[in-house]
């Protein structure tokens, strides 16, 4: 979903660029408040993890594959602000060092995948967690539902931008149906993997999962339990 | 740590394009792609001008086209999207005869839109590839620093670029271990194993970050990375030790 140059007109690109810059600016401050002088190495390493996770493809059907977007996963693992910051850094590095995603579309990409992806994912995660019993076992379920909602929501936000500043005369309803339908399928894959990954981290290091803070575990953290690689 | 990290797109050279200051190249790239995006797509000859300008820069950089062209596959999904637009777009339609007596009904405005997407996307990808091929990652980071990108953001990007190959290789070894035990990481049936792998990768990356931070502190880290201010060639031996810890 890395939008290339030319997909949106120049005003839309500049406007989303301003939104993205403001979002990243706030995320930098909030991450710094949380991580202090650990921010640079920790966020850098988590960003490298998100990038590596995005290399894993899963079949979506019709011979195509989707890959993990990771916004909701990062938000649950390290908190929404640090998560959004890490996904933004991934997109920056991909655009500037790997020519993946257009430079003029960077604002759009950050707004959709980092800001919408992380915050919608985290918002749904919190809502679901408030409903479910306060157990560690609820955290992966809530994370999966957050991921499930975040991906089609980002696709719907893409459609909204396309209706405002798109460069093709396609009926908005058609784009919406195609984008949301397609990303619902990707969202299911994203949800299952996100839930399983969060569950795996909770098994070995529940103290590292930001979204599991304040959730009482039935047992003390088992630091000795090794995750089979 | 091993050599060669973060250099996947860089094509070593000493041309004027390679030697130009990185912040200038980033600004020029941004101006170029903005100009391409802002050009009305019906101004067909102008895109020829854009392309000629870009080709002139590539020729001057002496990066071979057979190096750049295979790396443009990134763009293929969007070319597919662009190719679909004439079929679904609104407006008056034109009939395109196909061999075998069939006719294809395509939207006129959709064809123009598809052209616009394809040409702007392609120019953007080629221009970005040229920057990546002619500029070392550390140079790009220093350029961003000179362009007043927030210091902390530059540092985070620096750490990501530095540890990208370390973390990717970590994942690669785990995937190899999975495959050698008969697990196909692409099959949804093996997602639990894949997810445990990713979970372990997160824990390893996070703990590596903690170790790197402690190593930095023990070498006097005070919130700034001095290595980005000094030229990389002359300071290879004195490069800040914590980047390599």
Image (cartoon, helix red, strand yellow):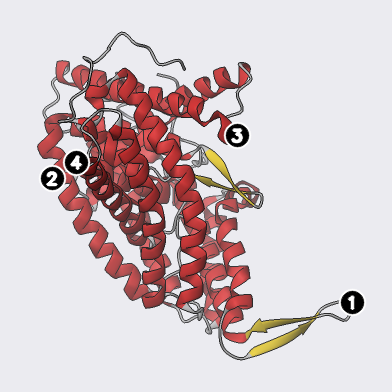
Cα–Cα gap, marks 2 and 4: 10 Å
Q: Nearer the viewer, residue A187 or B152?
A: A187
Q: Earlier in the sequence, mark 1 or mark 4?
A: 1
Q: Is residue B140 visible?
A: no
Select label 2 or label 1 by which is in front: 1
Both labels 3 and 1 in a single chain: yes
Query: How far is disc 3 from disc 1 in space, using C-alphas?
Result: 41 Å
In the rendered image of this protein, does residue B41 appear above or below residue A212?
below
Compared across the picture, whether A74 is left or right of B14 comes to left
Is residue B176 visible in this depiction of the protein? Answer: yes
**Tag in front: 3 or 1:** 3
Residue at numbered disc 3 = B187
Do callouts 2 and 4 point to residues on the same chain?
Answer: no
Q: Mark 1 or mark 4: which is in front?
A: 1
Q: Which residue is mark 1?
A: B100
Say if labels 1 and 4 share a chain.
yes
Q: Secondary structure at mark 3?
A: loop
Give yes or no for contact between labels 3 and 1 (Cβ–Cβ under 8 Å).
no
Q: Is residue B198 left or right of residue B119?
A: left
State the residue position of label 4: B152
| Dot 2 and dot 1 within a common chain | no
**Of circles 2 and 3, which is in front?**
3
Residue at point 61%, 63% (across, down): B80
């Amino acid at each position: 979903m890395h939008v290339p140059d030319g997909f949106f007109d120049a005003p839309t690109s500049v406007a989303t660029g301003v939104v993205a810059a403001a979002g990243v600016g706030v995320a930098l401050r909030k991450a710094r408040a949380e991580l202090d002088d650990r921010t640079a190495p920790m966020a850098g390493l988590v960003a490298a993890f998100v990038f590596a996770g995005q290399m894993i493809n899963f079949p979506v059907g019709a011979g195509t594959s989707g890959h993990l977007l990771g916004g909701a996963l990062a938000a649950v693992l390290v908190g929404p602000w640090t998560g959004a910051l890490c996904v933004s850094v991934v997109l920056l590095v991909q655009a500037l060092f790997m020519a993946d995603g257009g430079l003029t579309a960077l604002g759009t990409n950050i707004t959709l995948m980092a800001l919408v992806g992380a915050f919608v994912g985290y918002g749904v995660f919190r809502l679901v967690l408030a409903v479910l019993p306060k157990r560690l076992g609820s955290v992966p379920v809530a994370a999966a539902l957050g991921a499930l909602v975040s991906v089609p929501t980002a696709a719907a936000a893409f459609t909204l931008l396309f209706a405002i500043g798109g460069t093709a005369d396609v009926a908005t309803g058609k784009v919406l149906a195609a984008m949301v339908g397609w990303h619902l399928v990707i969202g299911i894959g994203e949800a299952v993997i996100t839930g399983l990954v969060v569950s795996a981290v909770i098994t070995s290091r529940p103290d590292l999962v930001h979204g599991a803070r304040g959730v009482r575990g039935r047992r003390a953290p088992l630091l000795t339990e090794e995750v089979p690689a | 740590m091993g050599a060669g990290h973060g250099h996947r797109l860089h094509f070593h050279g000493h041309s004027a394009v390679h030697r130009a200051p990185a912040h200038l190249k980033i600004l020029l790239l941004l101006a170029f792609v903005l100009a391409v995006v802002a050009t009305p797509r019906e101004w067909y000859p102008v895109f020829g001008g854009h392309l000629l300008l870009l080709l002139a820069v590539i020729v001057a950089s002496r990066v071979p086209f057979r190096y750049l062209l295979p790396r443009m596959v990134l763009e293929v999904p969007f070319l597919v999207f662009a190719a679909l637009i004439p079929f679904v777009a609104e407006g008056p339609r034109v009939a395109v005869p196909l061999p075998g007596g069939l006719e294809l009904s395509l939207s006129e405005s959709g064809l123009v839109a598809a052209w616009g997407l394809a040409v702007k996307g392609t120019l953007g990808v080629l221009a970005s590839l040229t920057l990546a091929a002619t500029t070392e990652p550390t140079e790009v980071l220093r350029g961003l620093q000179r362009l007043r990108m927030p210091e902390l953001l530059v540092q985070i990007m620096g750490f990501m670029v530095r540890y990208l190959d370390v973390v990717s290789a970590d994942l690669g070894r785990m995937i190899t271990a999975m495959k050698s035990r008969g697990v196909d990481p692409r099959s949804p049936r093996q997602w639990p194993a894949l997810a445990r792998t990713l979970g372990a990768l997160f824990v390893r990356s996070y703990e590596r970050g903690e170790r790197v931070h402690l190593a930095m502190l023990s070498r006097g880290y005070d919130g700034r990375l001095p290595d980005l201010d000094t030229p990389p060639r002359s300071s290879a031996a004195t490069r800040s030790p914590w980047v390599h810890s």
